[in-house]
Each structure stands twice: as C-alpha cells, then as structure tokens.
Amino acid sequence: MFRPVLEKFTPDVPTGPSGGRPRQEDAQEFLSYLMYEMHEELLKMRGCSSSSQQYVPSELTQIFWGQQKSIVRVEGNPDSADIVQPFLLLHLDIHPENIITMEEALQLFSASETIEGYKTISTGKVQAGEVAASRSVKIQELPPILMLHMMRFGYGCNGTTKLNKTVSYPLQLVLGDDLLADPTLDQGRHYELVATITHRGQGPSRGHYIADVKQSDGRWVRCDDASITTIGTNQVLGEEAYVLFYKQL
C-alpha cells in the first residue's frame, strides 16, 4: 500500500509555466499528503468512502488523528457554538517575538481571539446584528501520537520565507488545562518526544531535511540522507525543529 501511494506524489513540478528547477517539497505538506492518502487506501480496502461529510475513521486515524473543538462565544449569549473536527497536526505559530518555547506556542494556539464583524440572527437570547464574539480552539480527543508543526515558512509578497528561530521543546510534554476542552481530563495528557524533523538551510528553497528518531532501547539516531549516526539528547534538543512527534505515555 505504501509504495503505490508514494508513487502518486510528484515533487518534480516546475516552478512556473516556463519550466525551471523543480521546487523542493515541504516535509510537513508531504507528511500530510502521505497520511491522508494512506487513510483513503485503508478505507478502500474496507469498502468504505470518505467522500461524505461524515468523518470515517481508519486504523491510521486511531494512531495519529485527534479531535479539536472550535468554540465561538457571543457576548450576551451564555451558550457557545462548538464545532468538533479531526486534526492530523497541530499548527503552532512561532512568529511572535515572545514565543520562545513550545509550551508558549501551545498556549497561543488555544488562546481566545476576537472575531471582527461577527453577526447574529435574532433569537430569544440575542438581537440580530453585529456583536462582540471570540473564538478559541481546544483539544477534544488526544491522539496516541501527537504531531506538532512549527510554522517556520511564510508566504507573502516577497515569496516564501523561512523563520530561523530557536524555540525550545521538552523531552517530556504535559498538556496544560488551557489546551484541553475538558480540563478535568488527567489521563492521556502526558507525552514523550520520539522523533523530530528539521530543515537545514537559511531559506525555504535550499537546504535539506534531517530526522532524529528515538530507538526502542532509548538511544537517539540521526538520519541525514544516507548517514545514520547515534546522537545525544542535547543534540536532539539543540535543533530548530520543524515537525515534532510525541508519543502518549
């Protein structure tokens, strides 16, 4: 199943209609593509389809997918509008200057934000019109493997840019109450780091990726193209990681 899915991916796409050098594919985008395509293949093997609006789980989603709840609160209305959706990775904004740790990035991810121009229809509790409203995202269901994406690449009028910034991350991660839809949940919020992906290079169009992986005996190895070497935890934690994998304890 893995090879046919992999062969569908075509990274050698020219940068424009006139051709040119193939673009370097983003590791996070490739990971998402691979996971979703393998999920589809697993559903096909069971005779299922994910084309409907309803979320259909697979053996893969039971390992890597979680559920997140988007909560909208409207001033004057005690009820909240909640939408629960599956997620594969948590995308963490690390661009603010005050974000220097993963824990701070997670707090920013779940922080409440104001919704500009939010309008409601008339109900028994709220008058129709523009009202003050806020939105926050919480984790409803924790996955066995939690994947965190540090958003280092940006897209603007000057093209794609890369943020070369050190953001520390722990070997042991405990998710705080402010990140969970149910703060009373105690089991399942403890994780350990088992792998990282790092992009080496100053810009997004050059450089290459390395992966640090924890072995079953506790040793860490670094995969750098064809080179596989044993490394220490200080080397693991000293990288500007791009994607991190945490295993539930």
Image (cartoon, helix red, strand yellow):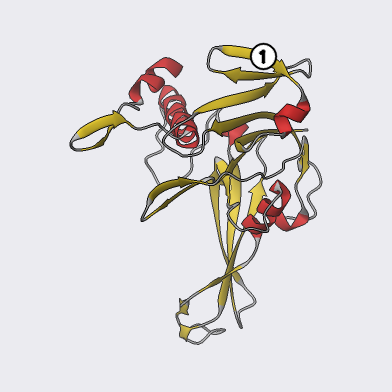
- 195 vs 56, left or right, is right
Tell which of 4 and 168 is nearer to you. 168
Picture quadrant of residue 178: bottom right
Residue ranking furthest to the left? 18
Q: In the rendering, at what x and y percent does residue 247 appear?
A: 71, 32
Q: Which residue is mark 1?
A: 229
Note whether residue 148 is visible: yes
Picture quadrant of residue 143: top right
- Quarter of the figure with the N terminus: top left
Picture quadrant of residue 20: top left
Q: In the rendering, at what x and y percent does residue 141 appear?
A: 66, 46
Q: In the rendering, at what x and y percent does residue 180 appear?
A: 71, 53
Q: The disc labelled 1 sits on which kind of residue?
A: Thr
- Quarter of the figure with the C terminus: top right
Tell which of 140 and 153 is nearer to you. 153
How packed mark 1 is, by other alpha carbons closer than 10 Å (few <14, some 14-19, many 20 or more), is: few
Residue found 45% across the figure and 39% down from its top: 204
- 35 vs 210, left or right, is left
Residue ranking furthest to the front? 202
What element does badge 1 sit on? Answer: strand
- 247 vs 25, left or right, is right
Note whether residue 1 is visible: no
Q: In the rendering, at what x and y percent does residue 196 appear?
A: 63, 30
